[in-house]
Amino acid sequence: MTRNNTKRNAALLAAGSLDRIALAVFTPNKKLCHSMLEIINLDCVRGGRTLFRDLNLSVGEGTLVQLQGPNGSGKTSLLRIVCGLLEAEKGEVRWNGTNIRRLGEEYHQAIAYLGHRNGLKEELTPMENLRLSNGVTGNKVNAAQAEATLKQVGLESRQNLPVRFL
């Protein structure tokens, strides 16, 4: 698999709760060893208050990063910056060596953002939620693609269980 093809098949899952956030990076190509996600000299200022300054992080394929901190410390802001939903005061986020601002839609198709209010329908199954959320964004996902995605995040055995029971 070429690096170019890997960019299209790689994925970033960003999830957050009130006191911690997690970033997971994965791709079908297990031979990669370069950093897929890089955070370089990132500053975040919200409401005139500096939440973090000169943040640097390099995340390779297959890595899970968990950050913990009190409310208001910048965890959700970091997630939103990494996902391209919020502009950093300074610095950049790179995906496979390219600034995410230059990647545009290609990057947004490779990521999933789950905030502490994740938008999942509790009465639906993970499979139904996945298909629904992709349909809303205009991405058609067939059953095989959805099953592969659920397997990557460890939900293949629970794909038919309502989310409220997970």
Image (cartoon, grey):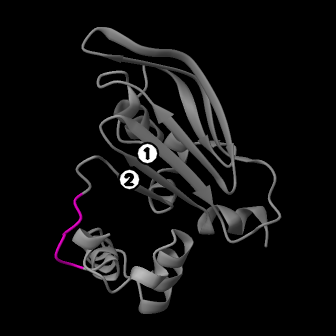
Query: Element under label 2?
Result: strand
Residue 159: image location, x then y, percent:
38, 83
| Residue 52 vertical placement versus 131 (above, below) | above
Residue 9: image location, x then y, percent:
61, 69
Residue at (47% x, 51% y) in the render: 104
Q: Which residue is mark 2?
A: 113
**How much space separates mark 2 and mark 1, taking CA atoms?**
7 Å
Query: Element under label 1?
Result: loop
Labels 2 & 1 near each other (Cβ < 8 A)? yes
Query: Would you identify the image quadrant in which residue 48 lies?
Result: top left
Residue 23: image location, x then y, percent:
52, 47
Farthest bottom residue in view? 143
Amino acid type for the residue under numbered disc 1: Cys
| Residue bounds of the magenta highlight | 119-124
Precedes in sequence: disc 2 or disc 1: 1
- The circle on residue 58 is none
Query: Would you identify the image quadrant in which residue 127 lies?
Result: bottom left
Residue at (60% x, 54% y) in the render: 25
Q: Which residue is mark 1?
A: 83
Choose between 165 and 137: the one closer to the eye. Answer: 165
Q: In this rendering, which labeled residue sits more in front, label 2 or label 1?
A: 2
Amino acid type for the residue under numbered disc 2: Tyr
Tell whether 107 sits left or right of 135.
right
Verify whether residue 131 appears in magenta: no
| Quadrant of the image containing the C terminus | bottom left
| Quadrant of the image containing the N terminus | bottom right
